[in-house]
């Protein structure tokens, strides 16, 4: 069997276009090989680079090509195709089409066992994202977390940080800010405890804690944490629109609107460049634009 690189190692989720180039370069050799399962998975991941850029027709076309290559014994490749088709529908605002696909992927993965743990957890976590009822979201995220905590697969266990984050946001959306804070603090502790610590995910976990401080009206703590995050980003020559936004919101809530304005302007300049956010939350973008304006 041909030895090709692990597809997840080629991914940069912040740069789906660049990831697509790497996948395309690999495609001719894979297509010429006898490794049909890898070919299916490569086409599915290439489709994901398109759905992340909201190029849904291209994504569906690639998934059609992948599914045409499937055979009965290709369980994990089939799970991955189901996941990517579901993600494509969900990103296009059609969760009712996505949910049955995620559920089928979860059922298949559960039947296969440990070898599919990573993707089974992914399916449960996508069920939670596509569900509209908080109780259902919690049920699926907790099912995913149970699998992640029990799996002998180290990569499957790596889902825990994301799942803590998602559960925290579900509690936050339900208005249970104390529970949300407890989960976000657990997520931060887990992120910081990892041997190969990802500093960006640690910063995101800190941001979630700070955002929940604001919801709890712990405004001075919220502001201080976001200021610390801003200094961390500046220390490595980076910026973050979400940190700017929170600094503006904290200052505004503290009655310091003049100080807040430039942060809102910076937030709008950065966040309006995120196609998915501009498409999903136009009112948020409009508000940032107004609050950041000198007029």
Image (tube, rainbow, N blue to C red):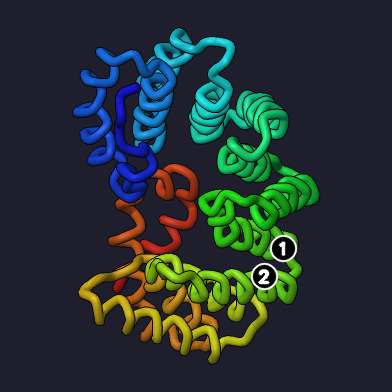
Pick the quarter of the image with the N terminus.
top left
Snapshot quadrant of residue 295: bottom left
Q: Position of residue 264 (x, y in %)?
A: 37, 71
Q: Position of residue 270 (x, y in %)?
A: 30, 60
- The residue that label 1 is drawn on is 171
- The residue that label 2 is drawn on is 183
- Work out whether residue 247 or residue 75 is closer to the camera in this orientation and state it: 75
The extreme front residue here reads 1
Residue placed at 46% from the left, 8% from the top? Answer: 68
CB under 8 Å between discs 2 and 1: yes
Q: Position of residue 43 (x, y in %)?
A: 37, 23
Snapshot quadrant of residue 132: top right
Q: Regarding mark 1 in the picture, which secondary structure is present there?
A: helix
* Residue 32 falls left or right of residue 224: left
The crowd level at tag 2 (other Cα within 10 Å; few <14, some 14-19, many 20+) is many
- Work out whether residue 256 or residue 161 is closer to the camera in this orientation and state it: 161
- Can residue 89 be seen by looking at this rendering? no
Residue placed at 57% from the left, 76% from the top? Answer: 189
- Can residue 49 be seen by looking at this rendering? yes
* Residue 160 falls left or right of residue 290: right
Q: Count the marks: how many?
A: 2
Instruction: Say which mark, if any, is on residue 199.
Output: none
Q: Regarding mark 2 in the picture, which secondary structure is present there?
A: helix
- Work out whether residue 219 or residue 62 is closer to the camera in this orientation and state it: 62
Say above or below: 295 vs 84.
Answer: below
């Amino acid at each position: 069997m041909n030895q090709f690189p692990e597809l997840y190692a080629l991914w940069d989720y912040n740069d789906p276009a660049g990831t697509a180039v790497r996948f395309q370069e690999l495609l001719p050799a894979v297509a010429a090989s006898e490794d049909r399962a890898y070919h299916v998975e490569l086409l599915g991941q290439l489709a994901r680079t398109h759905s992340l850029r909201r190029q849904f027709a291209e994504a569906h076309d690639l998934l059609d090509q992948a599914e045409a290559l499937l055979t009965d014994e290709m369980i994990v490749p089939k799970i991955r195709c189901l996941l990517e088709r579901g993600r494509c529908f969900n990103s296009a605002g059609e969760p009712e089409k996505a949910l049955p696909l995620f559920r089928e992927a979860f059922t298949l993965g559960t039947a296969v066992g440990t070898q599919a743990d990573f993707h089974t957890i992914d399916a449960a976590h996508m069920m939670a994202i596509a569900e509209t009822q908080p109780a259902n979201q919690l049920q699926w995220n907790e099912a995913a977390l149970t699998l992640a905590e029990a799996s002998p697969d180290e990569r499957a266990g790596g889902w825990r940080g994301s799942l803590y984050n998602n559960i925290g946001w579900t509690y936050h959306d339900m208005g249970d800010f104390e529970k949300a804070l407890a989960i976000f603090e657990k997520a931060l502790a887990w992120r910081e405890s990892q041997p190969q610590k990802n500093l960006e995910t640690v910063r995101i976990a800190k941001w979630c804690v700070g955002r929940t401080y604001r919801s709890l009206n712990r405004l001075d703590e919220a502001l201080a944490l976001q200021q610390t995050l801003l200094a961390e980003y500046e220390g490595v020559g980076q910026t973050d629109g979400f940190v700017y936004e929170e600094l503006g919101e904290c200052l505004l809530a503290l009655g310091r609107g003049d100080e807040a304005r430039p942060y809102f302007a910076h937030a709008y300049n950065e966040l309006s460049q995120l196609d998915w956010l501009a498409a999903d939350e136009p009112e948020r973008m409009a508000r940032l634009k107004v609050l950041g304006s000198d007029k």
